[in-house]
């Protein structure tokens, strides 16, 4: 177990390096929400999900849907590391004619449904979950949402319906980093009491530190055992996590690091990796 | 003349398809009785999902179903099937080119007594600018059947626009071919291009005109997208004068589609019969067709005025 956690922490570090590198090269994109969701995506792609990068359309695969499509650098990095496509493709992120579009895109191997317009992902995941149940498949569906997008009414329509349909193969994850473009979520439109809201909508709610691999895995395990209702993991995270000058800085929601900032960021990540190994 | 509900035929056709193909799922938003998806729901409850009054969720969920290989039919009233979930249709269904068939009922002014909030007059305009989606406006109940079958057989997103009221069954219809319009009646003086219930109104107008020594060629363009460019251009070349009739705003619908083609390929004078930048209101379908000058006598008058002014 310890070895597994250590490996996943190293993977998360690697994903962060790739996020920084690809965004610096792209000169645009969203580092804050990519870095806050890094451990969540790491746990999913390198432990939780049953998937096969050599056969992205394997019918029995677990589904992952990124509702917060702007966090795609984290997803792209994970997909590349899994072998869905060549790592070199990461360096063309957001470039004209590139595979990797500015927001999650279904032309990319490993991505079933694209996103970008917020608030629709939980509905997409609900459709996948219902289709799976109808087909008597055992796959599970995971949907990563941002906190800002919970302000969309569509999310709550989906939440209400998912509980109604008892879609217990569905697991939502809220990357609760407390920031959105215009500032602190609490100041823009407060989501609290968030646990009460999901509970009232009929969901099984678990909470964790969204950067703690052990806690995340425990939540994912728990979600698999819940019957008769969907589960949501409210993962408390830090926007820009892992890079000192990006953490909790709203400007890095949608600004790429400069060459200089990239260097510092990668040095910080190197240092952390060394600390982890020792 | 036989009067039928297009939505009855939709319900029956969907049920028949459901018996043949267990991969079909049907979604509705609390209007299954009115849209007639209830017929499918009764026989296949496990494949029918009532999403309640939540159209955005229903549309985005249809994409999730489709991503798992399902053929998804989604129904509600045209007003709520298009305007409210437009983002979900554009970004999640059409961008991904999913196999989702939106079959909306209660389109147009002939919804009647429910009034403006329920009379979709902009739905074609809203959807027509979105890539990948195909749009069909059947002229009667039987054409509805072939439109639904065609949508089922053709991969990708569709919008099929049906009305609420009973519609007369037209004679001399040609075989339904997606994207191909056809001539119902040959005339001398000009062409009337119509879709949906306005095809019948155009045919009735032709009766009035014939008594005055005028005759129009009546054309049914059931597929608004992709539209039959070839036919429209050949008609423009032959007749030089065209009137387009639709139960829709004159901006963004069939009239716009025809003008877009002809202004590029064969500029001729094109007149319109449709709703002119107004909202609907309560009333019987017949009262409203008259009040909004969509009924056959108004089409006939438009033709006469057109012929007079285009001679000067």
Image (cartoon, coloured by chain):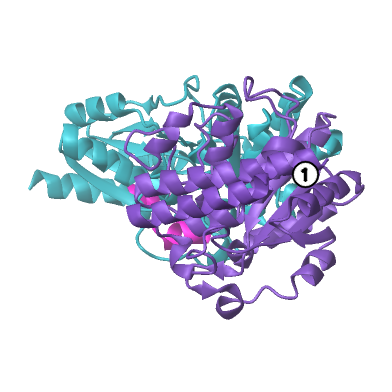
Q: Name the residue located 77 percent from the left edge and 44 percent from the top edge.
A: B49
**Furthest residue to the bottom?**
A187
Q: Residues within 10 Å of mark 1 (few under 14, many from 20)?
A: some
- For this rendering, which residue is in front, B187 or A96? A96
Name the chief secondary structure element in magenta. Answer: helix
Left or right: residue A108 versus residue B56 is: left
Left or right: residue A237 versus residue A2 is: left
Which chain is rendered cyan in the image? B
Q: Name the residue located 79 percent from the left edge and 50 percent from the top edge.
A: A214
Quarter the N terminus of chain A occupies? top right
Q: Which range is magenta?
A: B285-299
Q: Position of residue B171 (x, y in %)?
A: 51, 27
Residue B293 sits inside the magenta stretch: yes
Q: Colour of chain A?
A: purple
Above or below, B153 against B272 in this view is: above
The chain letter for the residue carrying disc 1 is B
Label 1 sits on residue: B49
Residue B91 sits inside the magenta stretch: no
Q: Name the residue located 55 percent from the left edge and 77 percent from the top edge.
A: A188
């Amino acid at each position: 177990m310890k070895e597994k956690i250590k490996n996943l922490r190293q993977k998360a570090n690697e994903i962060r390096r790739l996020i920084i590198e690809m965004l610096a090269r792209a000169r645009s994109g969203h580092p804050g929400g990519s870095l806050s969701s890094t451990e969540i995506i790491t746990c999913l792609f390198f432990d939780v999900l049953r998937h096969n990068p050599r056969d992205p359309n394997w019918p029995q695969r677990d589904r992952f849907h990124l509702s917060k499509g702007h966090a795609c650098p984290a997803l792209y990095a994970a997909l590349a590391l899994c072998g869905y496509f060549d790592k070199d493709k990461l360096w063309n992120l957001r470039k004209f004619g590139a595979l990797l579009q500015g927001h999650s895109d279904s032309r990319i191997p490993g991505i079933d449904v694209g996103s970008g317009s917020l608030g629709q992902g939980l509905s997409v995941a609900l459709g996948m979950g219902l289709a799976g149940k109808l087909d008597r498949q055992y796959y599970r569906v995971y949907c990563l949402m941002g906190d800002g997008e919970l302000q969309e009414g569509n999310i709550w329509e989906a939440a209400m319906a998912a509980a109604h349909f008892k879609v217990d193969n569905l697991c939502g994850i809220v990357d609760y980093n407390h920031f959105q473009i215009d500032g602190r979520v609490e100041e823009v439109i407060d989501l609290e009491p968030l646990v009460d809201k999901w509970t009232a909508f009929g969901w099984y709610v678990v909470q964790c530190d969204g950067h703690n691999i052990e806690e995340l895995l425990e939540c994912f395990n728990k979600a698999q055992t819940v019957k008769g209702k969907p589960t949501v993991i409210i993962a408390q995270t830090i926007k820009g996590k892992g890079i000192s000058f990006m953490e909790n800085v709203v400007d890095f929601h949608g600004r790429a690091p400069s060459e200089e900032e990239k260097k510092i960021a990668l040095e910080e990540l190197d240092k952390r990796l060394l600390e982890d190994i020792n | 003349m036989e009067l039928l509900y297009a939505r009855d035929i939709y319900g029956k056709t969907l049920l028949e398809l459901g018996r043949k193909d267990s991969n079909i799922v049907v979604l509705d938003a609390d209007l299954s009785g009115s849209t007639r998806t209830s017929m499918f729901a009764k026989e296949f409850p496990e494949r029918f999902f009532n999403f309640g009054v939540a159209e955005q969720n229903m549309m985005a969920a249809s994409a999730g179903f489709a991503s798992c290989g399902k053929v998804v039919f989604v129904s509600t009233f045209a007003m709520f099937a298009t305007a409210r979930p437009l983002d979900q249709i554009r970004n999640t269904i059409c961008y991904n080119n999913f196999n989702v068939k939106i079959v909306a009922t209660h389109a147009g002014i002939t919804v009647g007594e429910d009034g403006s909030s329920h009379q979709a007059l902009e739905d074609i305009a809203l959807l027509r600018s979105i890539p990948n989606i195909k749009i069909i406006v059947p002229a009667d109940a039987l054409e509805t059947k072939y439109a639904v079958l065609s949508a089922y057989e053709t991969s990708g997103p569709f919008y099929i626009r049906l009305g609420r009221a009973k519609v007369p069954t037209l004679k001399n219809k040609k075989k339904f071919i997606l994207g191909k319009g056809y001539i119902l009646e040959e005339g001398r003086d000009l062409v009337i291009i119509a879709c949906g219930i306005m095809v019948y109104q155009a045919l009735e107008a032709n009766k009035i005109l014939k008594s005055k020594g005028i005759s129009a060629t009546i054309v049914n363009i059931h597929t608004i997208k992709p539209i039959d460019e070839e036919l429209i251009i050949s008609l423009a070349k032959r007749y030089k004068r065209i009137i387009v009739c639709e139960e829709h705003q004159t901006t963004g619908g069939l009239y716009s589609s025809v003008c877009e083609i002809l202004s590029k390929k064969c500029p001729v004078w094109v007149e319109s019969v449709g709703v002119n930048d107004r909202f609907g209101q309560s009333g019987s379908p017949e009262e409203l067709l008259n009040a909004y000058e969509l009924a056959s006598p108004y089409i006939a008058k438009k033709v006469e005025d057109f012929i007079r002014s285009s001679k000067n």
